[in-house]
Amino acid sequence: MRATANWPDEQSAGGFHCHADFELDRFEPLWKQMAVLQEDITRELRIAPASEPIHLFLFERKGTYEEYLKLHFRDVPYRRALFIKERGPGMVFAFLNNDFETDVRHESTHALLHASLPVVPLWLDEGLAEYFEMPASERAHGSPHLSTVIWAARFGQTPDLAKLEQIGSLSKMGATQYRHAWAWVHFMLLGPAEAHDELISYLAAIQSLTPPGVLSDRLRQRIPDLDERFREHFRNWK
Ligand SMILES: [Zn+2]
């Protein structure tokens, strides 16, 4: 682990070790949520708890964040917040901005998933991060994606899950793909019990290194009228 020593402030929250160049107590409610985030994810996805600590590196200023990343991770493309896992434990990087808390929860969700599962399909990784980036009380009803998805469902549209599954690089994930990925996660976590079951057994297969197959195929086998059930979930939501 490089450069973990001598940060102006350091704190642990659940399995997270936070290192910051500002006073972490300023975000005390966030650190409390973070400890619960890990429990929420393991409970809702029935995956094993992260097997290793996760380090959060947090910066007051964007400029310091950029310099730090340039120095230590020259080849990583710039993003407002980052999750990086190379050989060792996962690392999350973020700086203070209006979406700081959302950024921290989003990237930490990636970190928790990758500390528990050997691999996570890209679209599902992002869909879960979009879902768990909201504070727990707002996950079901408070996402900025929700109203667009409800309207699309009312107009008979279901996002194409098989298409999401084919996305192989983050550069192919635009705002629409993030919203669609979030919507399928919302459906599987809060919709029909069979869909939640199928997600759980799919992740269990990944966890036990068994070929999990294709999630959309599995869902369709279990729920033959999948697209209609998806629309129904959102049409009736609230
Ligand atoms: Zn992400």
Image (cartoon, helix red, strand yellow):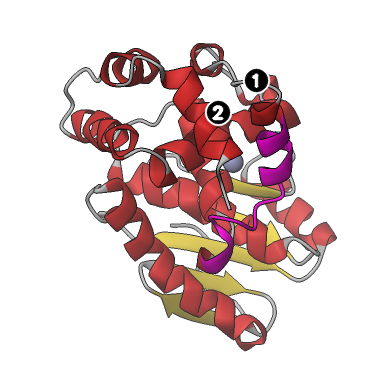
The residue tagged 2 is 231
Q: Which image quarter: residue 99?
A: bottom right
* Residue 114 in the image, given as x and y percentages of width and height: 38, 42
On residue 209, which mark appears? none
Image quadrant holding the N terminus, namely bottom left
Total count of labels: 2
Highlighted magenta segment, given as a residue range: 137-151
Quarter of the image where ligand 1 sits: top right
Residue 144: in magenta span: yes
Residue extending farthest to the right is 63
* Residue 117 in the image, given as x and y percentages of width and height: 30, 39
Q: Is residue 232 left or right of residue 223?
A: right
Dot 2 falls on a residue whose secondary structure is: helix
Q: Is residue 231 left or right of residue 85?
A: right
Q: Which residue does the image show at 25% across and 47% down from the upper left?
A: 47
Q: Which image quarter: residue 178?
A: top right
Determine whether label 2 and label 1 are within 8 Å by CB. yes
